[in-house]
């Protein structure tokens, strides 16, 4: 299982040091973009992503929690994203947005909120490089893990195997050394945020996740 660390709750004042401290121990950097409309919070946009791009060659896993993501894909490509994930609930043109992302040679991911079933994205699964299951209501880090995400991860792995799809199954929200045990068998990637970046000893927390 790969580890994608969300920097949403990192201490931005010391972002370079804080990122450098963990970068060798993680697989992806998860970048949570929020527009205050699709979710009830604002975070950062392409400028911040661009400014930290020179710090590492690791995969930038950008998670767009914005309405009409198709309008902004190019900005997040230009900022240096390697994977761009958007929400099925956020656009009327899901396939067009997937194709747009791929046209830039960037991997395309699709995310579902806790109340959205896997069924809602079934038709898009053949085209996806990642499926991101939200295990909290998107908008904030540090929330409680929602158990209904477990069955979705299992279902997505079964569909992948049966149909020879290639997407990575990823989960996002409320992951710590306990909750990870409930889902890790069904994941290719997991996003971890505050459990790691809000801790005084992030390297130790990474170890605990990896060994769970
Ligand atoms: C929530 C974000 C998540 C979140 C993860 O809207 O998409 O990536 O910040 O943070 P934790 O692990 O603290 O739930
Ligand atoms: Zn996220």
Image: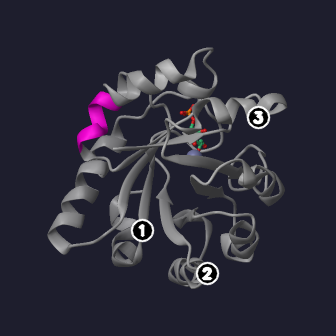
Say which residue label 2 marks. 104
As rendered, which of 40 and 199 lies closer to the eye?
199
- Look at the numbered disc 1 and say if its residue's Cβ is closer than 8 Å to ligand 2: no
Say which residue label 3 marks. 15
Dominant secondary structure of the residues highlighted in magenta in the image: helix
Q: CA distance from mark 2 to mark 1?
A: 14 Å
Whichever of labels 2 and 3 marks the residue nearer the N terminus, that label is 3
For the rendered model, the colour scheme is one colour
Q: CA distance from mark 2 to mark 3?
A: 28 Å
Figure check: 147 above or below 212: below
Q: Position of residue 60 (x, y in %)?
A: 60, 55
Q: CA distance from mark 1 to mark 3?
A: 29 Å
Say which residue label 1 marks. 129
Q: Nearer the viewer, mark 1 or mark 3?
A: 3
What residue do we see at 76% from left, 54% from top?
Answer: 35
What residue do we see at 67% from left, 35% from top?
Answer: 19
> From where the camera sits, is residue 9 visible?
no
As rendered, which of 9 and 42 lies closer to the eye?
9
Task: Using a 10 Å C-alpha cutoff, classify the residue at mark 2 as few (fewer than 14 neighbours), some (14 to 19) or many (20 or more).
Answer: few
Q: Residue furthest left?
A: 162
Q: Quadrant of the N terminus?
A: top left
- In terms of secondary structure, where does tag 2 sit? loop
């Amino acid at each position: 299982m790969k580890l994608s660390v969300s920097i949403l709750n990192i201490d931005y004042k010391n972002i370079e040091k804080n990122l450098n401290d963990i970068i060798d121990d993680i697989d992806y950097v998860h970048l949570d973009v929020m527009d205050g409309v699709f979710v009830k919070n604002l975070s950062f946009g392409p400028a911040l992503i661009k400014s930290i791009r020179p710090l590492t060659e690791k995969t930038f896993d950008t998670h767009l929690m914005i309405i009409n993501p198709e309008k902004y894909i190019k900005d997040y490509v230009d900022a240096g994203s390697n994977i761009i994930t958007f929400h099925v609930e956020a656009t009327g043109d899901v396939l067009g947005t997937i194709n747009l992302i791929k046209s830039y040679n960037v991997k395309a991911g699709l995310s579902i909120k806790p109340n959205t079933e896997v069924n809602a994205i079934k038709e898009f699964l053949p085209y996806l490089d990642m499926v991101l299951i939200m295990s909290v209501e998107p908008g904030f880090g540090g929330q409680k893990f929602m158990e209904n995400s477990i069955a979705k991860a299992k279902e997505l792995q079964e569909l992948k195997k049966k149909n020879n799809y290639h997407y990575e199954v990823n989960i996002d929200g409320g992951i710590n050394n306990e909750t990870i045990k409930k889902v890790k068998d069904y994941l290719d990637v997991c996003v971890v945020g505050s459990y790691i970046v809000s801790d005084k000893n992030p390297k130790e927390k990474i170890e605990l996740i990896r060994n769970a």
